[in-house]
Amino acid sequence: MRSFLLTLLTTALATVISGPLSGANAGLAPLMQNLPGRQTQLLDGHWNYILDIYELGFYNYRMREDPNGFFREAKPRTPSDLIEYDFDKAETLMVPGDWNTQRTDLLNYEGNIWYRRVFDYEPVTGKRVFVYFGAVNYECVVYLNGNKLGSHEGGFSSFNFEVTRFIRKGRNSLIVKVDNRRKVEAVPTNNTDWYNYGGITRSVYVAEVPGTFIRDYFVQLQKGSDTQLNGWVQLDGTGASQKVVLEIPELRLKHTVQTDEKGYALIDCPAKPVLWTPDQPKLYQVLLSCPTDTVADQIGFRRLETSGKKILLNGKEIFFRGICIHEEAPFRSGRAWSPEDAEVLLGWARELGCNFVRLAHYQHNEHMVRAAERLGLMVWSEIPTYWTIQWENPATLQNARNQLSEMIGRDKNRTNIAIWSICNETPPSEPRNRFLKTLADDARALDGTRLVAAAMEKKTVGNNTQTLDDPAADFLDVLSFNEYIGWYDGLPEKCDVSNWVFTQDKPVMITEFGGGALQGMHGDVAERWTEEFQESLYKHSVAMFKRIEGLSGTTPWILMDFRSPRRIHPEYQKGFNRKGLISDQGIKKKAFYVMQEWYQEIKALEDQRNKTKASGRK
Ligand code: GCB
């Protein structure tokens, strides 16, 4: 009954949050689940672009939205016609990809760029068609064949528009106005520590589905259970009241539900899956079918909960051996987006000994989350509520809520997602606490099966006593925080005298620590920017962590050096945050091996403990 009520609430909330969207989100269709499982045509490749610093393709000279904007793709009909732009003759940018690293003149560009892609399409009778964007940073307005489809705000989430009415047989033209200007009221706000890569940064697809299709579903184990599947399915289309069959062939499971007139049905059925673990990341083929549609997904199942200071995965205590990762491409820098980028980054995480990755500070591309799931890496997934958000601005709250529901909307079936994170290093105050409480409540209502957390900040009380004193900790599941003892906060030796005290009986997780080193720069342990300084900082930190009672996980900052406009030292930083354990060119620094050794040690102890427990049970 409880789960029934929860699911009802979840659906109601999902409609409230993702319903007709306010602000810069307009015209969107509810996101279709599992894009990789759909019939698609990829629109990646060369797109013509026009740089539009003054937004003259959008506004007329009275600053009104111009009905004859660039989306019309006007062409001179006679030689005397005046048309001052031409997509056909414009240069191209690769999609997906940030514009900054594709052309030196765009490296620091923050403004508007128009993209155009011409493609052929062969309509299939009875099919509905959507245009799906993996992500566009930060805001966009989208047009197909001269029709405005709508707009989207938020640089890291996926969204789609239905184009059934607008797509044509033969030549089609998709135009996207992208604006990456930073705004104080946005999420993130205008100040961050990462590069503001602009553009259509992830793949674009045309997706074809039947008239009535399985738009969305949620299939996971019921919280606290190993043997009960729980979730829902949502059809989209006419005649939505139908039978939907859930099948997991490997488990010989077949369960039929009947959708209501809104196309919605609860799923609740027994199952005995082999549980997903980092050592055995078992995924099952899951099929959902209704009379007109079938969609296949790879889904894993596991149980996750906390008990006092412990985090339990499938009932067993587990230490989250993690690492923070930005969506930054290895070797070439720029935004990462491809399956290959994901393989490299996550391969390094595995080599480090991780079973967990903190995907900072926003939702990463779907390849990343799915590859992590296959590789046995649990995920902390975050929205960019970062530093000094406008806590009292209702539009800012709405924006953050949208981004949270879009993040959960896309990735809720990925069993490796362990934690939804609602912010990073935000300063406590009444308005901020209320803002975060709303997000935490939303996250739980949308998905009650994960832990909800945030990267908070530690506090020093007295001389060397460190603690967490943040009211948000009351409504979060984990005492998770960033600390930079040894870098921003004293020298590495400060770790040796720091004591940690926590008043709440919840798991403790250190979501950032570390310091910068320029790979290849060597010197004394006391010399900042050397690999030796960073290595020593890691050694002191690890020794300190061993003394923290209830520590359940760490995610050092960060796997790889990344581009950031805040990092301007001409010799050591050169535009890069150098706290990576690996350089932007893929070379490991000394500190990598300190962390690797500690993680191997933890894993060996954990294996030993589980073995002893198992043999004790025999
Ligand atoms: C932090 C932030 C992270 C920064 C990092 C740093 O606390 O959460 O985004 O990049 O520190 O390097 O200072």
Image (cartoon, helix red, strand yellow):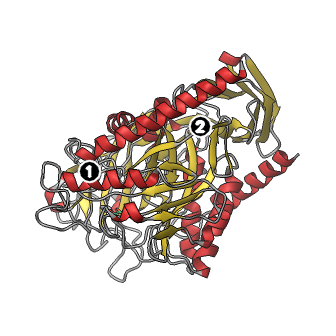
Q: Secondary structure at mark 2?
A: loop
Q: State whether residue 586 appears in this view.
A: yes
Q: State whether residue 167 appears in this view.
A: no
Q: Looking at the picture, does residue 475 appear above or below residue 264?
A: below
Mark 2 belongs to which amino acid?
A: Thr
Task: Say which residue appears at 61% left-offset and 25% top-offset.
Answer: 612
Disc 2 crowd, CA 10 A, few/some/many (<14, 14-19, 20+): many
Q: Which x, y percent locates residue 502?
A: 59, 64
User: As drawn, is 122 to the left or to the right of 72?
Assistant: right
Work out how far the residue at label 1 is from the one at label 2, CA to CA, in angstroms. Answer: 34 Å
Q: Which x, y percent locates residue 318?
A: 57, 39
Residue closer to the observer: 358 or 39: 358
Q: Quadrant of the C terminus?
A: top right
Residue closer to the observer: 504 or 548: 548
Q: Which label's residue is closer to the chain start, 1 or 2?
A: 2
How many numbered circles does the render carry? 2
Q: Which x, y percent locates residue 187?
A: 47, 68
* Label placed on residue 415: 2
| Residue denoted by label 1 | 535
* Label placed on residue 444: none
Mark 1 belongs to which amino acid?
A: Glu
Task: Say which residue appears at 79% left-offset and 40% top-offset.
Answer: 266
Tag nearer the camera, 1 or 2: 1
Q: Secondary structure at mark 1?
A: helix
Picture quadrant of residue 476:
bottom right
Q: Which x, y percent locates residue 441?
A: 69, 62
